[in-house]
């Protein structure tokens, strides 16, 4: 990182790391957000942490923006045609997405909706077998595993929820769990719509594609969602696309939600409670705009403008000049 900063010609100290742990971690974060030299904050973590930091930043004598990524269920919809044709391969792809990095990717599929039928049964058997054959993994920190186990306990206690499969255990590592429920269970138990950060997924059985549309209409703000469909599913896929576009930042067709490419078209954001700034992205070139403040110098003679603003700026991205963020002239 230091070499990259130097090679880019940025000031020394443009990148810094302040390692901490436990309660001290929260203290360091609080001091940073309240420090007068800080003019904007980016955060990835829990809903409680993101909302707390946003409230702190708003309490400052001069409030500053907080861009908080706070959690997401990243729903996946397996439409009947795709499920009947590709049940086993879909199970393999989705298990790999759920299991990777001990389920600690912010775009991990949390709820997987599938239409009842032979394809759903083959999908369930395959993903359960993969889970049972999987090895336990280390989570990022003991407190994250504790939070995961607490969350799993609440999900398992919900009426109608069952454990379909679990991987090999190995304390203090965490096994992967596949849970099951009916669509009606999610109607009765609001907590099942909350994120479960860790290696698990909840399979939600629906009577048909219409029931899946009903589920989609209840999705809370999420970073991403995925639809798997083939030609016979076209009408349902179109309806799902319209619904999900209103509640996610990135909608994937025939692909998993994990694996976020850093590209100009990528959106890594979403409506509340996935983030507190739904108009922004945390990945891709547009993410830079979050750290800029536009300034207009109207009718300024060229001699008054610093050299940085005399150069063309084809991307239209603001630049920081002498501590002040400003935009290039048209």
Image (cartoon, helix red, strand yellow):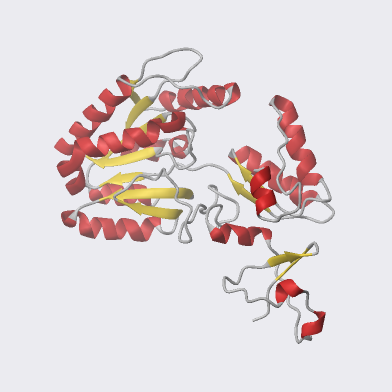
Q: Is residue 175 left or right of residue 23?
A: left
Q: Which residue is pictured at 80% across the width and 64% down the height?
A: 322
Q: Closer to the camera, 324 or 179?
A: 324
Q: Which residue is pictured at 41% across the width and 24% down the height?
A: 156
- Residue 313 vs 69, above or below: the answer is below
Res 161 seen here: no
Res 153 seen here: yes
Q: Which residue is pictured at 69% across the width and 25% down the height?
A: 22
Report x, y in % for residue 118: 14, 36
Q: Is residue 286 left or right of residue 161?
A: right
Report x, y in % for residue 36: 84, 50
Quadrant position of the C terminus in the picture: bottom right
Total numbered circles: 0
- Residue 174 vs 60, above or below: the answer is above
- Residue 106 vs 301, above or below: the answer is above
Q: Closer to the camera, 274 or 40?
A: 40
Q: Which residue is pictured at 39% across the width and 49% down the height?
A: 225
Residue situated furthest top in the rendering:
171
Quadrant position of the N terminus in the picture: top right
Task: Examine the image and state in which quarter residue 185 appears.
Answer: top left
Report x, y in % for residue 169: 41, 14
Q: Closer to the camera, 159 or 202?
A: 202
Report x, y in % for residue 64: 75, 55
């Amino acid at each position: 990182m230091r070499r990259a900063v130097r090679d880019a010609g940025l000031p020394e100290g443009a990148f810094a790391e302040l390692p901490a742990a436990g309660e001290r971690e929260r203290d360091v974060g609080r001091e940073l957000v309240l420090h007068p030299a800080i003019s904007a904050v980016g955060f990835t973590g829990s809903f409680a942490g993101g909302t707390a930091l946003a409230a702190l930043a708003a309490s400052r004598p001069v409030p500053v923006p907080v861009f908080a990524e706070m959690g997401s269920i990243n729903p996946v919809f397996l439409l009947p045609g795709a499920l009947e044709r590709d049940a086993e391969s879909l199970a393999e792809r989705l298990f790999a997405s759920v299991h990777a990095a001990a389920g600690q990717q912010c775009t991990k599929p949390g709820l997987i909706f599938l239409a009842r039928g032979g394809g759903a049964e083959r999908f369930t058997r395959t993903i359960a077998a993969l889970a049972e054959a999987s090895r336990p993994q280390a989570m990022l920190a003991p407190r994250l595993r504790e939070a995961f186990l607490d969350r799993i306990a609440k999900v398992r206690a919900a009426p109608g929820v069952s454990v379909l499969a679990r991987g090999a255990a190995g304390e203090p590592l965490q096994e992967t769990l596949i849970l099951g429920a009916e669509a009606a269970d999610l109607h009765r138990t609001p907590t099942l719509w909350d994120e479960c950060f860790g290696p698990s997924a909840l399979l939600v059985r629906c009577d048909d594609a219409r029931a899946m549309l009903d589920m989609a209409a209840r999705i809370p703000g999420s970073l991403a969602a995925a639809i798997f469909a083939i030609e016979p599913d076209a009408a349902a896929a179109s309806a799902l696309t319209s619904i999900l576009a209103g509640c996610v930042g990135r909608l994937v067709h025939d692909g998993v939600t994990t694996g976020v490419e850093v590209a100009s078209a990528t959106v890594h954001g979403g409506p509340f409670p996935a983030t507190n700034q739904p108009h922004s992205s945390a990945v891709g070139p547009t993410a830079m705009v979050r750290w800029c403040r536009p300034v207009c110098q109207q009718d300024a003679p060229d001699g008054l403008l610093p050299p940085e603003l005399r150069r063309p700026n084809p991307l239209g991205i603001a630049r920081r000049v002498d501590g002040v963020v400003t935009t290039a002239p048209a």
